[in-house]
Amino acid sequence: MTPELQKYYEDRFSMMATEGWTDLMVDVDGMAAALNNISAVDSEKQLQFKKGELSILTWLKTLREASSRSYEDLQGETNI
């Protein structure tokens, strides 16, 4: 792993260890719960927009886990 990539992951994990990240994840959960209701959708266009919003929120919610897996995979490649 390059030093730049190592720093990238260290900075990302440092950010995710903050109280601000925890607060953001609480907000993301609330936003996802509010968006995950299709009863107020009037058109297919609105439905597709909601799907996009939920997709972004899901990406944010799973970013820590995905980053950890990628980092571990990269470390495994380095140790081979």
Image: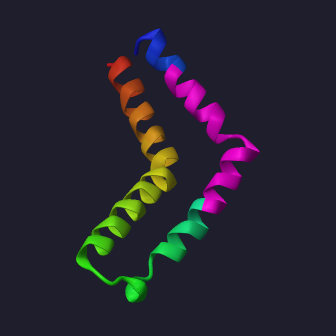
Residue lying farthest to the top in this orientation: 3
Residue lying farthest to the bottom in this orientation: 39
Residue lying farthest to the right in this orientation: 19
* Residue displayed at 72% across by 41% down: 18
How is the protein colored in the picture? rainbow
Question: Residue 48 appears in which quarter of the rendering?
Answer: bottom left
Q: Is residue 13 above or below residue 44?
A: above
Residue 39: percent from left, percent from top = 40, 89
Q: Which residues are magenta?
A: 8-27
* Residue displayed at 41% across by 11% down: 2
Task: From the viewer's side, name the closer residue of 59 and 14.
Answer: 59
Q: Is residue 20 left or right of residue 35?
A: right
Q: Quadrant of the N terminus?
A: top left
Look at the image and say whether residue 20 sits in the magenta stretch.
yes
Look at the image and say whether residue 74 sits in the magenta stretch.
no
Q: Is residue 30 above or below residue 3?
A: below
Task: From the viewer's side, name the closer residue of 65 and 57.
Answer: 57
Q: Is residue 7 left or right of residue 66?
A: right
* Residue displayed at 72% across by 45% down: 20
